[in-house]
Amino acid sequence: MRSHPLSLALGLAVAALSCSVSAQPLAGADAAPEQALDRVVVTATRTERTILDVASTVDVIDRARMDERLVRDLKDLFRYEPGITVTNSFGRFGIGDIRVRGLGGNRVRILTDGVPVSDAFSIGSFSNANRNFVDPDTLKRVEVVRGPTSSLYGSDALGGVVAFFTKDPADYLSEGERAHVGARIGYDSAWDGTNLGATAAWGGERWSALVNVGHRDGHETENMGEVGGEGAARTRPNPQDRQDSSVLSKLVFAPSADQRFRLTAEGNEGRARTDMLTSLGRQALTGAENTRVHADDRQTRARVTFGHEMDAVGAAFADSLDWQVYRQDSETTQDTLEERVTAAGVPERRERSFNFDQRTYGLQANFFKAFATGGAEHALSWGLDLARTDTRQKRDGRLTNLRTGQVTNRMLPDVFPVRDFPVSRTDTAALYVQDEIVFGDGALRLVPALRVDRYELKPEIDGIFAEDNPGLEVADLTKTQVSPKLGMVWRFRPDWSLFASYAHGFRAPPYNDVNIGFTNAAFGYTAIPNPDLKPETSKGVEAGIRHSGPVVHAALTGYHNRYDDFIESTRFIGFNADGLMVYQSQNVAEARIYGVELKAGVDLGGLSDAWAGWSLQGAAAWSRGDDRTADEPLDSVDPLTGTLGIAYDAETWGAELVGRFVEGKRRASADDLYLSPGYGVLDLYARWQVTPQLRVNAGIRNLTDRTYWAAGDLPLTVATTSGTLDRYTSPGRNVAVSLAVDF
């Protein structure tokens, strides 16, 4: 199931280059700057609505903001979004996942052009498949819906939805333009990395096309650690070489003004080779002396999508519609080479290989119908979502005695190859319906929504799984879940709105928890499937007030989310007839997270002509989370976090000073866990439109060179007594610059 994403996307790029371009140009998609709450979003309701008119908290990051903030990865993308955290691990694996209001992992739905990003999976110290599959340079917009969103997006939307939208040809073609060519080069000192990118777009009356290619090359991300050398005491980053490449290509055919066919091919490849200096020296657990440890991690994703949009269907069941079919292949391969001398003085080489592979086929269709009943106007949305996902995971390895040359696949506690769960196929089928009901003069909007999901899991026992788990019976699983939502928006004045919502979220029992399987008689334990697992669920209440005026915009939101039946993996449940300790995944945990969020901005020029061009932007998030089963705090919930920026924008240049402020962490699930101190960090950005074709962006982050621990970088289980806390610090003062040319 190995993917070949770059060749796949390049194939469509060649097709796009060869398409005919007629004489009539496309209109550009660029718009005048908007107030933050006047922006049009689609993820929250699947329809185009301004933020003032949606009954959810939605964050939007557009292309211009990404360029101004010199975004190169997910960490940069959400740097100034309190309540949204990107995790990062020290030493090898890098960026992990996105946490929304304290909930992360596979409990947040991540979409790229509507296609779900593959799952995260990790086991042990040598295996970590993350969800970092997006190149920010291919994006035109990002939308985040906070809170349970399963009424529209189904499983995994417990914590919210992160939706990435990639660029289209029309995003580059202004009025009167038939073609666009652009190039970009940049440098970032935080990881001594360079990035190169190029874009070409063509447009005519019916055909248009886009090709975007990018490449990054750099090293390990720096921190403020000062201890070098080899061994467990090292706090400086491990030496690392990193390369990332991406291709996005689109071909659009518009047979008429009100419909479009779109073929998209996208590919990403990433590789990181790490010299694991922190793993050298004597190992406390085994007594072995590691002399060399090298990691080679590779990650690929390929996506092909074919879709169709109709703006004027003119049928009883729909006024407009869109549908798409897709295939997506994602694969993570991580190899580890370890040379050591055992406690008994035997020199040996250990080679481990981890592979996690997902292939998904899907069909999505959405229909929209407007009608009136009595004094109410209705905007009905309904649709279906079908997907089939095949998931494979394997760990392999061999042990070589460097003295005798003997090679074996026995590396206790494993006899390789092994699978930690069987090859699994999951089929999902869902139907959703939502009605936006507008009363009277449009001041009051009610939004009921309902989605029904059918989830089927079918495992397959192959020779690898059977040999590692003799006699173990795996289980099929079939579940049906109903997810309702009710929202309300009251525009009590043209530029003010009150909103409230009640929503359910859920996550289907994962294949690896339902059929986890491993037995090790020598160590006295076994893990067994659990066909009785229930879906994890959430119930959320949210309410807030928004204002969008010509000078001031602001939004204040309060929320309370309750989570039930969280799955605890490999929970000890007793002993079997053979005296082995038995582990099984079970629904045991309940939690709640509640908090308050604020976003605001002021156009100072609207207050006084003397302040023309100046503006203020700020945001803050306070939250509290509790594990109600264990009666202890949730460590994944961030402390009070805020950002405040002051900017000046002129016709050809601009600058912004942004502060990030975090309160010290006060609560943890155990007394001996490290509570990271509070901090304030200043970042400075500048842009200069040198000519209409040439643009320069530059930034200095952490101006005061402060040592601090950012949320998501510090593992949740680090003890106060740890001697290597500086490993998890953020980079010191660093600079980034980007030069873009467009014709």
Image (spheres, rainbow, N blue to C red):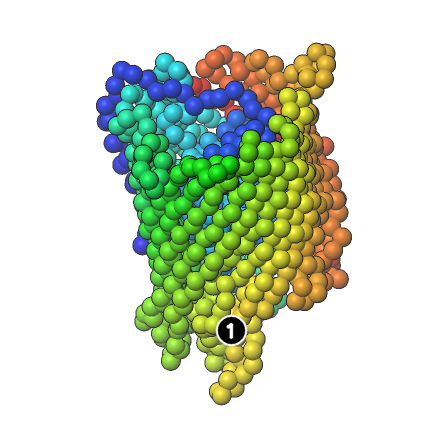
Label 1: which residue? 584
Percent position of residue 507, x then y: 50, 58
The residue depicted at 36 percent of the width and 16 percent of the height is 177
Percent position of residue 257, x then y: 31, 25
Which quadrant of the figure contains the N terminus?
Answer: bottom left
Percent position of residue 187, x then y: 52, 29
Which quadrant of the figure contains the C terminus?
Answer: top left
Which residue is at the far bottom? 577
Residue 270 vs residue 557, the one in the foreground: 557
Percent position of residue 429, x then y: 37, 56
- Up/down of 573 relative to 613, above or below: below
Query: In which quarter of the view is residue 670 placed?
Result: bottom right
The residue depicted at 65 percent of the width and 19 percent of the height is 648
Residue 452 vs residue 77, the one in the foreground: 452
- Up/down of 405 relative to 15, above or below: below
- Up/down of 108 relative to 259, above or below: below
Residue 569 vs residue 160, the one in the foreground: 160
- Up/down of 180 relative to 118, above or below: above
Q: As shown in the figure, which amino acid type bears the numbered disc 1? A: Gln
Q: Is residue 146 left or right of residue 611?
A: left
Q: Give neighbour class at mark 1: few <14, some 14-19, many 20+ (Cα, 10 Å).
A: many
Q: Is residue 387 left or right of residue 193?
A: left
The residue depicted at 45 percent of the width and 53 percent of the height is 451
The residue depicted at 38 percent of the width and 25 percent of the height is 170
Query: In which quarter of the view is residue 469 placed?
Result: bottom left
